[in-house]
Amino acid sequence: MRPQDRAVCSLFLLLLALTKPTKNSDFHLAGDYLLGGLFTLHANVKGIVHLNYLQVPKCKEYEMKVLGYNLMQAMRFAVEEINNHSSLLPGVLLGYEMVDICYISNSIQPVLYFLAREDSFLPIQDDYSNYVPRVVAVIGPDNTESTGMAAHLLSLLLLPQITYSAISDELRDKQRFPSLLRTVLGAEHHIKAMVLLMLQYGWNWVIVLVSGDEYGRENGYLLSEQLAGEGICVAFQETLPMPQPNLALTEFEHERLVAIVDKLQQSSARIVVLLSPDLALHNFFREVLRQNLTGIVWIASESWSIDPVLHNLTELRHTGTFLGITTENVPIPHFSKFRVRRAQAGPPTPNKTSPPATCNQECDTCLDTTKSFSTILTLSGERVVYNVYSAVYAVAHALHSLLGCNETSCSKEVVYPWKLLQELWKVNFSLLGRQIFFNKQGDLAIGLEIVQWRWDTSQSPFQSIAFYHPTQRQLSNISPVSWNNPNNTIPLSMCSRSCQAGQRKKPIGLHPCCFECLDCLPGTFLNQSDEFDCQPCPNFEWSHKSSTFCYKRRTVFLEWDEAPTIVVAVLAALGFLSTLAILVIFWRYFQTPMVRSAGGPMCFLMLTPLLVAYLAVPVYVGRPTVLTCLCRQSLFTLCFTVCISCITVRSFQIVCVFKMALRLPQAYSYWVRYHGPYVFVAFFTALKVVIVVGNVLTTTTIPTILSDPGNPKIMILSCNPNYRQGLLLTTSLDVVLSVVGFSFAYMGKELPTNYNEAKFITLSMTFYFISSISLCTFMSVYQGVLVTILDLLVTVFNLLGISLGYFGPKCYMILFYPERNTPAYFNSMIQGYTMRKD
């Protein structure tokens, strides 16, 4: 004997020893084929108390469940309707055996009873293919734990089982539960409907209360997963204590409930999701009423969302708004009257013995209690009732097909459970406007409703406010909710208010729903894919403060139509024309003492670079290019170096001629013989070329775009700013030459007037020195178009300083004082200077 067979046998023997006979026709109906029914007419959420005494629990000692009896009546109604008014199973009488399982306390014994034969004998054999148990199928039970226990036993014989309200997704596993089907959606859809309800009203800060049993743990975990995926945060989660069989509270349980309700009072969350059987909530809501907790939106799971006993606590209306998830309401004609009708015992079916008795098939107060709730049950509609009703009809259709029934008769052959199970998977029929068939998981795809509890006796106590489509996974037919607050406004339940556009979230604590809103800084924007970090704008874009996008920056450079450009261009044109005129004058009077004293041929070496520099002024204006940037880096500085080195050597010659010729005659002879002035100019020009070439090779001449520090909306298109380091080096060489030239000029200040060029050189060199130092200082601390303008302006002024400051006075003397431009006059000036020295 296999171990599992030995266990089944032992449990069944215990069942036979504990059974008591009863004759309540509410639980029995003889027939050709019997259906087993497992219902919770009484509830004991502890479920293990009876094991202390090794007795089958007496369910009638526990709390009566009105909904459980209502569902049992639905099975009776469906069987009688099929027997009396249906085209199904002509000539065949369906019967039933129903047992009260008192939630989870009495789950095993009834299943063994259903598996046994009519003689209460359950044989142990190797092959059950031809075995015929007492019932052909089992309807129920209602909760996941009992359904799982029953399914493990029923699956051994592949006896079909259809549960009407056990929603656990574990029951979808057909390898573990091959004979289990459901006329209800799984827990995933129920939780999804809850989450969609929260999203519909913008609630992202909720409290979750779960029962301490398998139902609470499993659904609480599933809810937490889906909430996290939708950005909804759980302020806290607590486990409600499970009450004793008599609903009495221990001291510890009472303290626990007080602490939980007090925590609800202190929390900023106003949405409470309750995942618990209804019996675990009676003491909880009494404590809620005692502490006068108000302003809460209670979201009920399917286990208590339409419970008439809890609804009968009318004071609950003051605690807030009650919303619940339940199955779709499908009206069943004539059922409301049948619900409160006592069953009539009929004659036994021919060739059938009287059904043997089993335990927990009595409920003395069920009918009377149900009558007291008749009004609310009628107004509530047939929601879970239709699940039982459709389950019975599914079995009937499968039997109809298996027995080969036609319009008038059926074969009434032996029905083996595994064959009936195969037919159940194939059923597809319409029942009260709903299509009945089982999907691959064995579930019936019936919709869900979100209901609101109402206490107005003129309407349904559970008013539908939305419908959930299992295929679309969306809410539809959304109706206004009557919020239980002074202004009838949607309650707010957010740890933090939503940020405005362009504000990022800075987390506070551990919950992503708790944050403070900070404006995105200029130059950054808030990307919709990341609410916690502002993204920097791309290089050529910018944004305002608190922006969600970036815009193109305006690219600026020195243009011809700007006033500073026009002023500098006019000065450059005048300088070019004046320098050209000086060149012509010096060419015309080349042989005169004035021109020769200014440097003679070297004057043309100075004037020519000046003209080239003036002509190159346009490279500073317009969109920078590689060529124009190269000209800026090389052309101007080379021209300046030639001019300044000529002026420096000229000032040296003046001092050398009048002061050093007598002291160092040999050095002076070498200076004259080897054309010292030109060697000096060539050396420093070559040195400048080396510096410029090195600068060009180490820094790119490609124009770059930089942000304007004064206005970030603007991008400055200019030559690469890295060349400024090289510019400082090249400028420093010119500055050194200007200082040397200034020094020599100062040493020759006492020379004859006609030879005394010190004041003109001093003026030119002083201006160049000051302007160069100022430009370098300005460029080191500022970036912008103003740098380009100032650079161009200083360049033009330096050119004018040399052409007008050095050559201008000489042209003035040549043109307006020709009598002083003669050899005799120059000789007289020299003789007079020599006599004064002596």
Image: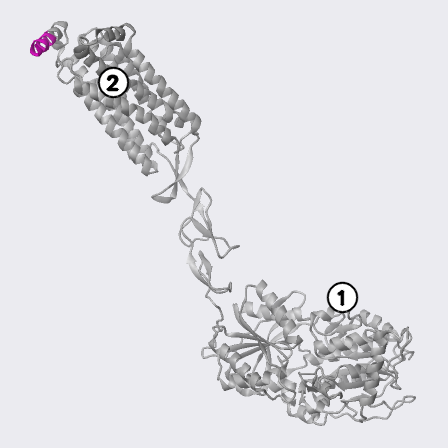
Q: Is residue 445 left or right of residue 263?
A: right
Q: Amino acid at mark 1?
A: Lys
Q: Is residue 805 visible?
A: no
Q: How busy is the neighbourhood of tag 2: few (under 14 within 10 Å), some, or many (20 plus)? A: many
Mark 1, residue position: 440
Taking depth in this image into account, of 825 and 831 the one nearest to the observer is: 831
Q: Which quadrant is home to the C terminus?
A: top left
Residue stretch rendered in magenta on the structure: 828-838
Say if the magenta span includes residue 837: yes
Q: Is residue 500 left or right of residue 252?
A: left
Report the residue marked by disc 2. 648
**Whole-percent x, y for residue 292 in the image:** 48, 84
Q: Quadrant of residue 423?
A: bottom right
Residue at x 75% of width, y 79% of height: 140
How many numbered marks are there?
2
106 over 554 or under it: above or below: below
Q: Residue 541 at x, y = what percent?
A: 44, 44
